[in-house]
Amino acid sequence: MRAAAAEAKSAERRKRPRELTIKGIPVSPGVAIGAIWDSEGQPAAPPRRSITAEAVEAERVRLGAAVATSRKQVSKLKARLAVLPEEAQEELEPLLDAYALMLTDSRLIRGARKRIETELLSAETAVLDEADAIAELILAARDDDKAGLRRRAGEVREIARRLTRNLTESGFRSFKDVPAGAILVAEEMTPADAALLDPGRIAGVATEEGGADGHTAILLRALGIPSVLALPGLTSAVGRGDTAVLDGAAGTIVLRPGEAAIAAGRDAIVAYAKERTRLGKLRRLPAVTTDGEEMELQANLEIPAELPLIAQAGAQGIGLLRTEFLFMNRRTLPDEDAHHIAYRQIVEAMDGAGTTIRVLDWGGEKDMEALAEGEEPFHAGPNPALGLRGIRMLLRRPELLDVQFAAILRCAHLGPIRVLLPMVTIPEEVRAAREIYDRVAKRLRRRGDRLPDKLPALGAMIETPGAALAADAIALEADFFAIGTNDLAMYTLAVDRAEADVAHLYDPLHPAVLRLIQFATEAALRLRMPVSVCGEMAGNAKFVPLLLGLGIRSLSMSAASIPRVKQMVRTLNVDDCARLARRVMEQSDPKRIAELVEAFVPGERS
């Protein structure tokens, strides 16, 4: 039978075309030429299984043993960090810390135990059900950083898979036998799999599943391994030993390439090496246009562990510090000292560069135990995006705002700080928050805390059509604006990017979205008030000329996006960008706008 199977596989290979190009999602730039090494697939999910009441204690014991084993495995992964490149260590360490935290008395473990006891489910079924429930709640949260939400949901599901493999004694994938210089092909790759890869041996990675926003993609980028995910039909089209050319920037893999494709791949390897050298030189150069206009390029920060990445990117500060990490995975609310310690660490690490701290942006998260402690739980309702969120929730629970304001103000003498209010829609919300802000400052001064004479600026996020259209009134109450383009586009177009049926309608270049950005920007500029853009538009180099032409001079983005955005800024002329903006704002067709943005060439007069 083995001979027959081998012959069938050989016949199948003979039927394959000599050269085949497959297009996927570009994840980690770089070009690799090498032999394919196909990896074994993931084990199938265990069947759902119920238990009797008598078996509850045995399942609890099984779960406890799986948790202990998983902790040891994560500890081994952490021990392995020392042999990886510095950037990979910085990306992997916070991820493995998150894994370790979820393997303590976390909501996942507590919820699985409860399902075993109350629903009479096997340990593996209880773990997977609880992980799915947590992941769905995370994905339903309102946040500009939808990619971050997907990553956090993926972390929960990855730990659930690890626990399940240990519960069912299913083997973990091993990459020890992959030959040096091979291109690793798999149906899917988890972050834990990526953590096991040796960038000194693996030339490239290609998978049939996956996306650009997950932790797997982030880790592959950190490891510097050229990678393409979501390549349709890949595993059925390759055979172990086939030669391939993988382009992580173009998002392609050429199977069984001819001489021309191999030659093109070699040229691309040389070009990529030159580009990396050029971008690396930009770190210490200013983000200044050819006619002397300076752009401020700052970074978004989700957790403190990302600080080294911000320094490496040459960011001019933190334009959006999300404080939600302080509230995650805990039963009680963080007190003023816990907030202060976290903010102090970040502000001191920035060494004089500015830090904009956004107060808690949460709502509709009924599983957030710390927020529900002693209070009626929050409910997402039928439409959580329109519920008790952002500043609305904070004004309903002013004690949360009080604690955060106090901790932030205590750090104000350590470096430049600004405070940002999420999801402001009317001027009254800024006024109400400022009353609390001033009251907290007076209390701190009475007790002897060191505060500057002038309090840090208090700004408003513009992320709804209502806020953009009322920007002139809100600008009279706020000290600065931060335009959250992700949510602004979502609310304007009534499109959830995570909803497959309508995701194609999500378009930040839609004329309605651009007019709202323009309206808010002009309202700020009329009062000579600082205004910045954060979200995916800020980190897309192709959008920078348009934003510059609309009057934006400050952008906040992921640290990884800063070098390419800076490179673009240094080629631009403000007058050219203004002409592009005028032409774009005359259009009513999103496709035509996209064409104009795509066709713009720095220095070329239109």
Image (cartoon, grey):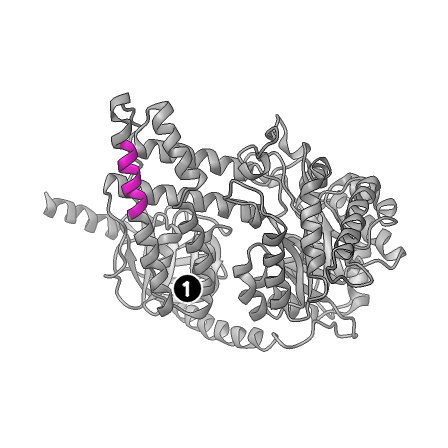
Q: Name the residue under label 1.
A: 225
**Quadrant where the N terminus is found in the figure:** top left
Residue 472 colored in magenta in the image: no
Please provide the residue range marked out in magenta: 59-68
Residue at screen point 50% across, 35% down: 136
Is residue 585 in view?
A: no
Residue 61 colored in magenta in the image: yes
Q: Where is residue 369 in the image (x, y as percent from the top left)?
A: 53, 36
Residue at screen point 81% across, 45% down: 435
Residue at screen point 56% across, 39% down: 370
Q: Which of 48 and 455 is in front in this view?
A: 455
Q: Where is residue 518 in the image (x, y as percent from the top left)?
A: 80, 51
Residue at screen point 47% across, 70% down: 268
In terms of secondary structure, what is the magenta stretch mainly? helix
Identified by mark 1, the residue type is: Ile
Secondary element type, mark 1: loop
